[in-house]
Image (tube, rainbow, N blue to C red):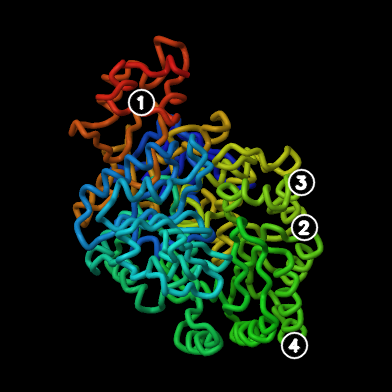
Amino acid sequence: MILFNGRIHTVDPQNPSATAVAVRDGKFIAVGDDATVLNQYRSETTQVIDLKGKRTIPGLIDSHIHLIRGGLNYNLELRWDGVPSLADALRMLKDQVAVTPSPQWVRVVGGWTEHQFAEKRMPTLDEINAIAPDTPVFIMHLYDRALLNRAAIRAVGFTRDTPAPPGGHIEKDARGEPTGLILASPNALILYSTLAKGPKLPYEQQVNSTRHFMTELNRFGITSVIDAGGGFQNYPDDYEVINELHEKEQLTVRIAYNLFTQRPKQELEDFRHWTQSVKLYQGSDMYRHNGAGEMLVFSAADFEDFVQPRPELPDVMEEELDRVVRLLVAQRWPFRLHATYNESISRFLDVFEKVNRDIPFDGLPWMFDHAETIDERNIDRVKALGGGIAIQSRMAFQGEYFTDRYGAATAAHTPPVKRMLQAGVQVGAGTDATRVSSYNPWVALYWLSAGRTVGGLQLYGDEQRLSRETALELYTRGSAWFSNEQQKKGAIKAGQLADLAVLDADYFSVEEDGVKSIESVLTMVGGKIVYAKDEFAGYAPPPIPILPDWSPVSRNGGYYAAARPGRQRPAERSNFGGDAAAISAAVHCCSGSCNVHGHDHDRARRSAVPVNNYSAFWGVLGCSCFAF
């Protein structure tokens, strides 16, 4: 295959730009100008694709995401990722309640924040109960709280006598009855354990769900991830779906997976068993083992709920962590550790340095995840031990809460990415999706380069913001280090795996807010086109039916499609039975750019006024933007 007439940003310092690539046997064999590549590599059997001048980049690599868990549940979840107003979100909820059969729940599980909404607030329990008097509804906001309607309270069995687990809180009214609000204070166990009471998809539909989630990631140009395990994600049982898809060659995202301990106080036993039964890096370039973490011992979990004060880790942490890390270093297993706060990181590094004195790390890959408040001294300690730091876009979703608690001056270098890079530490980028933030990598790239949250708060000044080139490098070549694959992928370079994304807008020249709206129009993994649309739709693989047919994905897709000419919501339908975008264009003459009042109608659409209720006062007028 040859792809030509592109604007290719290679992330290869030796050959930073090109217009054409040649691909054979899943790898790039040539990267250069059109004439050279076409003349030297085109034959009668070569498939030739005109990139039409589109910006093309290496496939994006999320160095910390929860794809396996997210895939098992994707078709069950109503996504509010990117939804611009609470009014839109509640309309989506109402539509989904109407088609969800008993005993299934409607669940909104992470990827959104109240600050993204025009109304700057969360839904109320009264609003949720009015929309869904009989269907259980579970709505989780980041890792700080969940809202359950009365039907969900009954479904999970909460009563006035139900105790909250340690680190959690069940709000009760004056009569002692649960209201439906549960809080992580600060431990997220109460959120996980309550969500786990809901119905699951049958195995065949979990397979379908995982395929759709991978396609959703391909939509944004993601071609590789590192799966960081997760709570209630048990090995090997919950890996059967991914194993089957790998065996059937149906994976469209490369997955390197870390093993996450599941049993408090039995962590050493877990890792002793796994290091004896699982071969490091076993698998293939599409699906491979990657070591231990992100949870090594439960006593080291410093949850990142910035609504709550920083948690104090127990005194037993050092002893428990020491035992596990000694085992992993002795077995030469790479490891990663969830580490939010500098105070925790200092204690973790004390353990690592002690182990290193007895059993040298000696080049063993290891890394911290998150590291929002790490200081300069600890960055240098990470560098001295040969570690890396995987950062995620959590501050894009929680920056307002962090600023309220710790102040704007502290938030302005949280996390201190530039200092990490200046120290020579390996840095990779990612999201920590699907619960604490959205899986959309362009939101993360916007946060890194623009320095703002999804709610618009300016966190970072020019001295802390990254250039778009550097941010992209962290999401490609930088992230490849975290699965020890930096020689295989992360750049468009001869000899590397042929993973790339063709973008619908030029990442390097689009206006700042436009970065978070970028999508891929053609995504390739190992020389195989796994996703294509718009002018490249003819190259798209056959569509996969969505199971079950009432799935929120069949009605709303995943991440909310930004308002851009020619772009529509994936499967959005209005109560008129037609395509909502088409009806909006017909009813509201200023659905896009307003020809009547000279401004973008998006301002009206994002407001709390029900402009999309076409039979009510505002909508029936045909143009509601006069009110703004």
Q: Report, in whole angstroms, how far the alpha carbon at label 3 lies from the one at label 4.
A: 40 Å
Q: Residue furthest top?
A: 596
Q: Residues within 10 Å of mark 3 (few under 14, many from 20)?
A: few
- Depth order, front residue of 180/344: 180
Above or below, 125 against 157 in this view is above
Tags 4 and 2 in contact by the CB under 8 Å rule? no
Closer to the camera: disc 3 or disc 1?
Answer: 1
Element class at badge 1: loop
Element class at badge 2: loop
Q: Which x, y percent locates residue 190?
A: 47, 69
- Depth order, front residue of 88/321: 88
Element class at badge 4: helix
Residue identified by numbered label 4: 358
- Depth order, front residue of 616/139: 616
Q: Report, in whole angstroms, how far the alpha carbon at label 2 lies from the one at label 1.
A: 51 Å
Q: Is residue 242 visible?
A: yes
Along the polypeptide, which appears first: circle 2 or circle 1? 2
Closer to the camera: disc 3 or disc 2?
Answer: 3
Q: Report, in whole angstroms, how far the alpha carbon at label 3 lies from the one at label 1.
A: 39 Å
Q: Report, in whole angstroms, how far the alpha carbon at label 3 lies from the one at label 2.
A: 22 Å
Does residue 145 appear left or right of residue 406 in this picture? left
Residue identified by numbered label 2: 423
Q: Residue at x 35, y 63 (%)?
A: 153
Q: Is residue 28 visible?
A: no
Q: Which amino acid type is marked by label 3? A: Ala
Does residue 446 appear left or right of residue 376 in this picture? left
Q: Residue at x 43, y 46 (%)?
A: 123
Along the polypeptide, which appears first: circle 3 or circle 1? 3
Residue identified by numbered label 1: 611
Q: Which amino acid type is marked by label 2? A: Ala
Closer to the camera: disc 3 or disc 4?
Answer: 3
